[in-house]
Each structure stands twice: as structure tokens, then as C-alpha cells.
Image (spheres, helix red, strand yellow):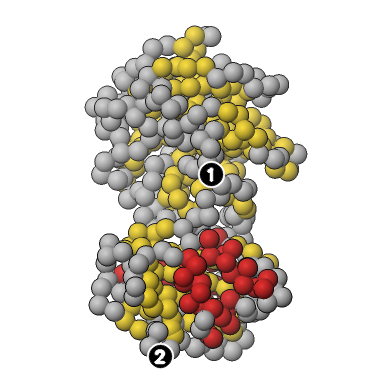
Amino acid sequence: MRRHIGGWAAVAIASAVWLAASGISVEARTTHATAPSAVALDGSALQTLINQDRAANGLGPLTWSPCLASIALQNAQRIAAQGSLSHTNGPTLDLGCGNQSTRAGENIAYISSGIDDPQVNTMYMNSAGHRANILGAYNYVGTAWVTTANGYGYNAEEFLYAPSLAPWGGSSQVSWESLGGPINDAPAVAAASTSAIDVFVRGKDSQLWHRSLRGGSWQAWESLGGVLSADPAAVSSGNGQIDVFIRGSDLQLWHKQFDGVSWRAWEPLGGVLGSAPSAASPAAGRLDVFVRGTDGQLWQRTYNAGTWGAWSNQAGAGGVLGSKPAAVSSGSGRLDVFIRGRDMQLWQLTFNGTSWGGWQALGGTLGSGPAAASFGSGRLDVFVRGTDSQLWHRWWDGSVWQPWNRDAANGGVFNLEPAAVAPASGRVDVFVHGLDNGLWHETVST
């Protein structure tokens, strides 16, 4: 097995330390011949190994930083693309992840046999420069792996000392917060009031798991049963009611409702779903569920006046979906459905209360399906994971679509599509599946 880590001598080493006061850096470089394209994978298991090494040496643990993890991913992608180990400005970027940061460091490596957390950690610990980073005077860490077409695994670790983490992405956002896990798929979220948010995920046991925000505090996770074969969908139609929809192991649509007091039993709603569902409520007592059918087209089923209608593909007939749909209502009777098309850009379909319009292209190159939210009449906020695995945002202000904006300027790297809900005017809460397979949350003021 061929392996390289940042450094000296026959085993090539590349480690770096940046001091905020002096700007001192130490680095070394090595190169090999291959520079294949890269695919990002989770590297967070290294946090556990790093903290075990620190505990064995009488040192406190390092706290995970999604900002550092995003920089680690950028560096792992860079060295994978160039096929060599080198440092650029990673530790300088690391310093920006904290408030009053004083010290940052970085370890990088590659192994020809792919991802191997114990092996790369052992190599780091057997090298003085890398060991110094792992056992250094830091309190935050972020790591990432990238694998390439030839089977190589590229790793980066970012270290930081700071009194606290800086808000992530500037004044319009608060820092990402971890809500635990592990989770299997993208989350779903609903808001029954301005102070009540409910988030749902498929757990590792394929059951539906629920966590709620009440009185400013997140409650413990609870299992709601079911057997999910994709991520869930959730919507509130008012009066404290929450409706959750899933694709079951039998590929049909299933529904579970919270009536404001307790959860009702699961009910089957038929169909053969080609994707996870999405749901919206354009009026009290009405529910609209959308899925991608096995034919790649958009299918809809509506609950109104106490009755479920039949499945229909009249909405957006002829459209071919490249992702599951995202549905939202921005006003009485209005529905907007967003998809990632086969051309990877964002597409929109609107129901004005009377009839459906045609598909409209909104541009971009999406790395995931979209999420949509609305906090007022005529307002639409759409979030996607970009091809850089970061959070991107575009919104309709009632008159025009604003340009794409990368909200998390310092990173925000995550897996799968985001989920979004608008519990109050000017506020959108975004949830993502993190690189650590956990649930992460941030609030965006718009």
C-alpha cells in the first residue's frame, strides 16, 4: 500500500501551523503523478481518534467545527485535483472560523488504498509535526476525506484555538448548531407557530424520528415508527396540526398526523413513488402532496374537504424531474413546486389558485434537489446544495428573482438536499444532513 502524509524524508509530510500574531508558517511538499477528479466523503470519524489521542496524553477534547470541516473539504479537494500535497491558505482561513482566534494548524495526507481513518491517524501520530497539531493547544477541529477515481484517499485536518466560534456566514446568519443523530437521509421540517418547529428524519433503523423546538429549547428525539425508504416530508396546515408523509418500504405513500394533542396511526395513501414526497398546505384543511413518479414526471394528490382525491399528473405534464420536488404555498390557494431538472438547473411550476402555469427555468447548477419556504404573501425562498457542497439561496421578493447567493461564505458543507421552513416574517430556518451524519440547523434572517 502506498501512502503519503504531509512531511519530511521518505514518507512525505505536509503539516502547517499559522500564528495569528506572527503569521509564521511551516510546510513541506510532495507530488505524485495522478490527479483524478474527486468525490467528497465524510471524514468526521477522525475527530474521535484525535480526541482519544489527546485523552491518552492528558489533554481535553476538540470540539467539532463545521466551518473548519468545510475548509478541510476544500483542501482535500484541492490536493486530490492537483495530485500532490501542498499547503496554501488553509490555516489562514481557519482563523476566520473563530472569534479572536490566536492559532491554527493543518495536517494533510493521501493513501493509495482509499479512506482509512485509523491508518492515517497512526501516520500523523508517528510524525512529529502532525503529532504536534493533534496534541496542540487547540479547542476546535474539522476533518474531511476525498476519494478519487483511482482509489486514492486524500485527507485534511484543520485545527483552531479561539475563545468561541464566529457566526457562520456573516451578520445575516447565526452559527450552525448540531442537533445530533445519526440520520440516514435529508431532513424535513414544519412550523406550527412562530415558536414551534418540528424536524423529522429517517433514522439508521429506517424509522421516523422527530425532534421539536418548544419554548426556545430543543426536546429529546422520539421515534414515531414506520418503515421509511426515503426521506420524509412535513407540513403544518394550522391549529397546531402537523402532517408527515413518507415513502414506505412498499413504495407507496404513507401519512401520519399530529392533531395538536397526539399522533394518529399511520395510513396508506397508495401510489408507486419514484422519490420521497413533498407537501404544502395552501389553505386551512387542505394538503397537497407531490412526488416524482416512476415515469420521472410530477404527480400530485390533494386532501380537501375531508377527502383524498385521486393521483394526478396534470400539474407540469411533460416535465421530467431530476430530483424529488419541493412544494410550498406563499398565499391562499397558491402553490409553487421546485425541482432540479435533468439539466441540473432549478425549475419552477406555479398554481395561481385556478390553474397551473408552465415550467420556468431559474438557472444555477444544483448539487441537490431544492428546498422551499415562504414567510409571507408573494415571498419565496429556495435553498440548494451547490456543486461545492455549500448552501446556496435564491429568493423571489414579490417582483423579481434575486441572484443566487452563497449564504455560508465560510463553508456550510453538507450532504443531500437541505430542508427549510419560515416560522416568522423575515426568518427562515434551514436544516441539513452534515458530513458527520448528524442533523445541523441555522437561522437565516432575510
Place of residue 350 in the rendered image (x, y in percent of width and height, measured from the top left):
38, 28
User: Would you say residue 16 is visible in this rendering?
Assistant: no
Q: Amino acid at mark 1?
A: Ile
Image coordinates of residue 332 in percent, x first then y, are 51, 22
Give the farthest residue toward the front.
1
Q: Nearer the viewer, residue 90 or 364?
A: 90
Q: Position of residue 30 (x, y in %)?
A: 35, 84
Q: Amino acid at mark 2?
A: Ala
Q: Residue 249, position in %: x, y? A: 43, 27
The residues bearing labels 2 and 1 have C-alpha atoms spaced at a distance of 42 Å
Picture residue at 66% right of the left edge, 39% below the top: 221
**Which residue carries the number 2 mark?**
9
Q: Is residue 278 above or below residue 157?
A: above
Q: State the residue at coordinates (35%, 48%).
A: 366
Q: Which residue is mark 1?
A: 183
Between 249 and 99, the one nearer to me in the picture: 249
Q: Earlier in the sequence, mark 2 or mark 1?
A: 2
User: Dividing the picture into quarters, in which one does residue 39 lie?
Assistant: bottom left
Residue sitting nearer the eye, 98 or 422: 98
- As drawn, is 410 to the left or to the right of 3? right
